[in-house]
Image: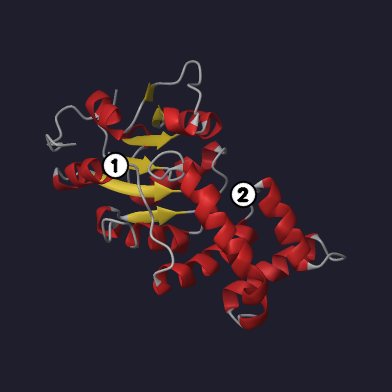
Amino acid sequence: MSAIRLILLDIEGTTLPIAFVRDVLFPYAARALPDLLRTKAEDARVKVALGDIAREFPARAPLDVIRDWMARDEKTAPLKTLQGIAWEAGFHDGDLRATLYPDVLPILRGWHDAGMRLAVYSSGAAQAQRLLYGHTQEGDATGFFEAFYDLGIGGKKIAESYAEIAQRAGVLPGAILFLSDVAGELEAARAAGCQICQIVRPEDGTVAAPGVPHAADLREAAAAFTPTLAVPATA
């Protein structure tokens, strides 16, 4: 097994409770998006997202498409962009604060302090990822990460996406450990040559996938894959 040089982390269900996304972030965006489409129509990001929607659904109102996507929790780039813009305002205004799992920040700090490279790969827009980690209940955690990857890199269930991340990071895929709760994402990362570990958190109802290494939280993942790191004793 290759030495791990980069730990790549999913967000929802891995470092952040699914309930926070489902019960806080998604409803906030749903309330904010109608006004956002009116008031930020000239924002370049909004224009691109609406253009993408119009090309795919020329006969439908963009807001109707967006609402359908949200109802099905679709991982489309235009939706994630628009949700990210809505959350940007909420985080900056203080209406939103991310609550990470209690094991996350101590382990991230331990890995970072020990010299481990860390990055995020999520279906949420990179800017939304930075906002989330920049506005946690414990303060700004963005300094732990060297990069934030989103669907612009490619789909999370496509092996080529993880190969691209490895190339951008300047490491071999085998030197990446990818942590996620989603079996399909992990299988894609493994197909690219990455090391993988499924985070199976009972409070989120995640089911352990057969044939996939798993851990209950980042503490267990740290113990299993990086035993020589100086992880804090309080973690």
Q: Earlier in the sequence, mark 1 or mark 2?
A: 2
Task: Identify the residue under disc 2.
Answer: 75
Residue 55: horizontal and vertical position, in percent?
A: 78, 65
Residue 128: horizontal and vertical position, in percent?
A: 46, 61
Give the crowd class for mark 1: few <14, some 14-19, many >=20 residues within 10 Å.
Answer: few
**Could you give the CA–CA distance between mark 1 and mark 2, rounded to whole angstroms?**
27 Å
8 to 189, vertically: above or below? below
Q: Secondary structure at mark 1?
A: loop
Quadrant position of the N terminus in the picture? top left
Name the residue at 50% across, 50% down.
Answer: 21
Q: Please tell me how many numbered marks the rendered image carries.
A: 2
Residue 207: horizontal and vertical position, in percent?
A: 51, 23
- The picture quadrant where one finds residue 66 is bottom right
Name the residue at 11% across, 34% down.
Answer: 233
Q: Is residue 19 visible?
A: yes
Name the residue at 31% across, 56% down.
Answer: 137
Give the crowd class for mark 2: few <14, some 14-19, many >=20 residues within 10 Å.
Answer: some
222 to 82, vertically: above or below? above
Quadrant position of the C terminus in the picture? top left
On residue 102, the disc is: 1
Q: Residue furthest top?
A: 211
Residue 31: horizontal and vertical position, in percent?
A: 62, 66
Amino acid bearing label 2: Lys
Q: Are marks 1 and 2 in contact (CB under 8 Å)?
A: no
Would residue 85 appear left or right of 31 to someone viewing this image? left
Give the mark toward the camera: 1 or 2: 1
